[in-house]
């Protein structure tokens, strides 16, 4: 158990703090994701700014666990742009696919400055992963 926390400390400090999922079976200590699905390779780009494990700290961007169905700009403790907070979006898969291709076209003034994949299959891999971690 201890070694799990040491191994994963860099990425998962928060989830080792005790309050996380207190399920007694910590058998899968080898896997980095404490629970839930493994991110697809297409999510690698997003991971440079976003954590996706439940309860993991915000990075340059907000934690994305639970993002589907969440109102834009409401992850606790993250300093969003006014543009994002005022966007009125409630995220679903289609909107996220549209957002990542050209974030500032959808939310003018957003702080997210990337151009994500245009390939619909790559978008789908990302958004269905986000849907899985939002249940
Ligand atoms: C260079 C850093 C960076 C990368 C790479 C990045 N993001 Fe972001 N993302 C941000 C920032 C910063 C915000 C907050 C934007 C704001 O406040 O305007 C954000 C916000 C978001 C939001 C809105 C979240 C909310 O709580 O309202 C979603 C959804 C999102 N990003 C998805 C993605 C996906 C999917 C990818 C990968 C394709 C990705 N991001 C890649 C920095 C990044």
Image: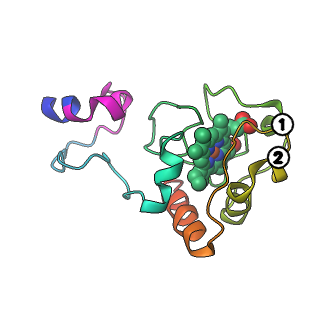
Q: CA distance from mark 1 to mark 2?
A: 6 Å
**Residue 100: image location, x then y, percent:** 68, 55
Mark 2: few/some/many CA within 10 Å (<14, 14-19, 20+) = some
Determine if residue 130 is in view: yes
Q: Which residue is mark 1?
A: 83
The relative height of residue 118 versus residue 49 in the rendered view (above or below) is below
Left or right relative to 29: residue 103 = right
Q: Which residue is mark 2?
A: 107
What is the span of residues highlighted in magenta in the rendered image?
7-22
Q: In front here: 51 or 65?
A: 51
* First reached walking from the N terminus: tag 1 or tag 2: 1
Quadrant assignment for ligand 1:
top right
Q: Is mark 1 within 8 Å of ligand 1?
A: yes
> Residue 85 lies in what quarter of the image?
top right
User: Which residue corresponds to the image point at 54% horizontal and 54% vertical from the top-left?
Assistant: 134
Q: Secondary structure at mark 2?
A: loop
Q: Are marks 1 and 2 in contact (CB under 8 Å)?
A: yes
């Amino acid at each position: 158990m201890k070694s799990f926390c040491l191994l994963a400390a860099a990425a998962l400090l928060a989830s080792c703090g005790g309050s996380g999922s207190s399920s007694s079976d910590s058998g899968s200590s080898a896997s980095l994701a404490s629970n839930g699905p493994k991110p697809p390779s297409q999510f690698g780009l997003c991971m440079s700014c976003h954590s996706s494990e439940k309860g993991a700290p915000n990075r340059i961007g907000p934690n994305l666990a639970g993002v589907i169905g969440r109102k834009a700009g409401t992850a606790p403790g993250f300093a969003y742009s006014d543009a994002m907070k005022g966007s009125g979006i409630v995220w679903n898969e289609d909107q996220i696919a549209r957002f990542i291709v050209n974030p500032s076209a959808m939310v003018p003034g957003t702080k997210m400055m990337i151009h994500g994949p245009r390939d619909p299959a790559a978008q789908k891999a990302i958004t269905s992963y986000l849907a899985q971690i939002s249940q």
